[in-house]
Image (spheres, rainbow, N blue to C red):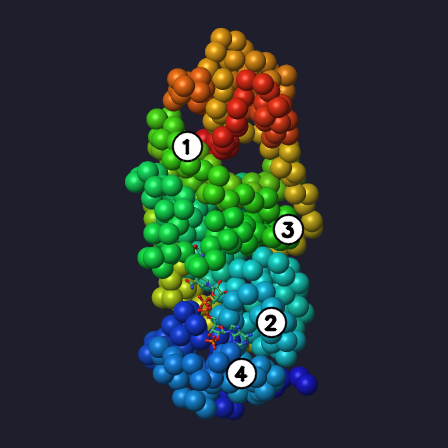
Amino acid sequence: MARKPAAHLERGYIGVGVLGMGVVGSAVVQALGERAGLLAERVGYPLRLTWVLVQDLQKRRRVEVPPSLLTNDFGSVVGREDTDIVVEVMGGEEPAHAYILQALESGLHVVTANKEVMAKHGPELLRLARERGTNVLYEASVGAGIPLVSAFTRDLAGNRIDSIRAIINGTTNYLLTRMGQDGLDFSSALRLAQELGYAEADPTNDVEGIDAAYKLAILAALAFRTPVTFGDVYHEGISRLNANDFRYARELGYAIKLLAIGRQEDGEVQVRVHPAFVHQDLLLAKVEGVFNAVQVEGDLAGRLLFYGPGAGAFPTTSAVLGDVVDSARQILQGGESRVPVSARGERRTKPMADLQTRYYMRMTVADRAGVLAKIAQALGDNRISIASVIQKETDEVARTAEIVIMTHRAREAAFQAALRQLAKSDVVHEVGNFVRVED
Ligand code: NAP
Ligand code: HSE
């Protein structure tokens, strides 16, 4: 059934329903109550919390909410005439995605913090919102309170964005900071992060680069105005790095960061998440702990850096409230959907095999004459040119040495072929690790 276009005028408020009352949802509900005056002033009309969906109606809540507003039945609230905006802060792909679809189908405006849903289903949800004349706004899904979605859709709209290089996962940046500064190995750094509440009990999405890939898909679609979804993003995690990688990186003048990189070149979009050597003079190398930073190159604006806390109940609530205010203003003004038009047509995603970059590699090799010549031969066979070689630790009993090689720019496919060749070589005991270099 079609919604009455100006129902809010009859009832005297704009109704807001909230899906989820966990870390973020509790702070959103609290802010809608405590900041009612400020929000009414910013919108020019009162907002009112109309319902909150949770799983467990009996759970003790950090923030008090009248029991009459709590429900665990989405079907009973989605069609209600007292609600104009649905805030989705449940998380996970389903049923959050299905609930957002239903809300949009019902003509409601949606505000979401859900990076997984937006990275996997963003194009479909934005299209539906446009068709229904509503909005789906998602500032909180990337970088919490750092204004990124609005910057790309509004403030940088006159630019051609050439690249994004970002640290957009606070958990892994914390782990890399501790490994780099304190010499901790991966599992000790992870244990510490879990004790401090920075890493979840199951850290897979963070440490394997999945969370950063969700966020990069969202940013790249906005920046390059083309549909980019999670499946397009190459992603690698940080668990292969060890203390020696950090030591050698420092000696060579680099920090190691999990970078989310988006670039458009020759009509193709490149989207990848992986650990990278970042030169210590660059601002991104200085981003430490759980902080996020997104560096954007616009052809008019130049190089910009957005920096701040990328998670947490209050920073995320800041972004959610901004979107609620924006939606409420649009409801008052009426008019078409303001969902950004992203589809300038599909653009090819550049295959990882075609990437050209420099590489760091660490290997354990036999410590005897002629070994370096064989390694140089394997790299040369694949047209990879060596920039420097350093022999590090030697084990006199095992007669092995660890060597570190920095290459000149090479094609990823050639580098991977060289790695396979080296792994089979009789002089290489182990290819310990490799890391791409971002200068
Ligand atoms: P959370 O603490 O796990 O809270 C999830 C809430 O959703 C809980 O209240 C839970 O109900 C409810 N819920 C989950 N599944 C449900 C279902 N099937 N039906 C009804 N209610 C359901 O999660 P969060 O940390 O607040 O994160 C929420 C969203 O914000 C996620 O998309 C996350 O990625 C995003 N986000 C979080 C942060 C952050 O710092 N936490 C930052 C940026 C973005 P019960 O309380 O009854 O269990
Ligand atoms: N797990 C995320 C991070 C939090 O570590 O950055 C919010 O997206």
Dot 3 alpha-carbon crowd within 10 angstroms: few under 14, some 14 to 19, many 20 or more: few
Query: Toward which corner of the image does residue 99 lie, by quadrant?
Result: bottom right
Q: Sequence order check: which comes first, mark 1 or mark 3?
A: 3
- Which of pointers 3 and 2 lies earlier in the amino acid sequence? 2
Give the residue pinned by disc 4. Answer: 72
| Disc 1 C-beta below 8 A from ligand 2 | no
| Amino acid identity at mark 1 | Asp
* Mark 4 neighbour class, 10 Å CA radius: few under 14, some 14 to 19, many 20 or more: some
Q: Is residue 295 left or right of residue 213?
A: left
The local crowd at label 1, few if under 14, some if 14 to 19, many if 20 or more residues have their Cα within 10 Å, is many
**Mark 4 / mark 1, whichever is N-terminal:** 4
Nearer the observer, disc 4 or disc 3? 4
Residue 95 is tagged as: 2
Regarding residue 337, the answer to whether it shows in the image is: no
Quadrant placement of the N terminus: bottom right
Amino acid type assigned to the residue bearing label 2 in the image: Pro
Graded by Cα atoms within 10 Å as few (under 14), some (14 to 19) or many (20 or more), the crowding at tag 2 reads few
Q: Secondary structure at mark 2?
A: loop
Which residue sits at x=38%, y=72%? 27
Residue under label 3, please give it.
231
Task: Decide: is 265 above or below 139.
Answer: above
CA distance for labels 4 and 1: 49 Å
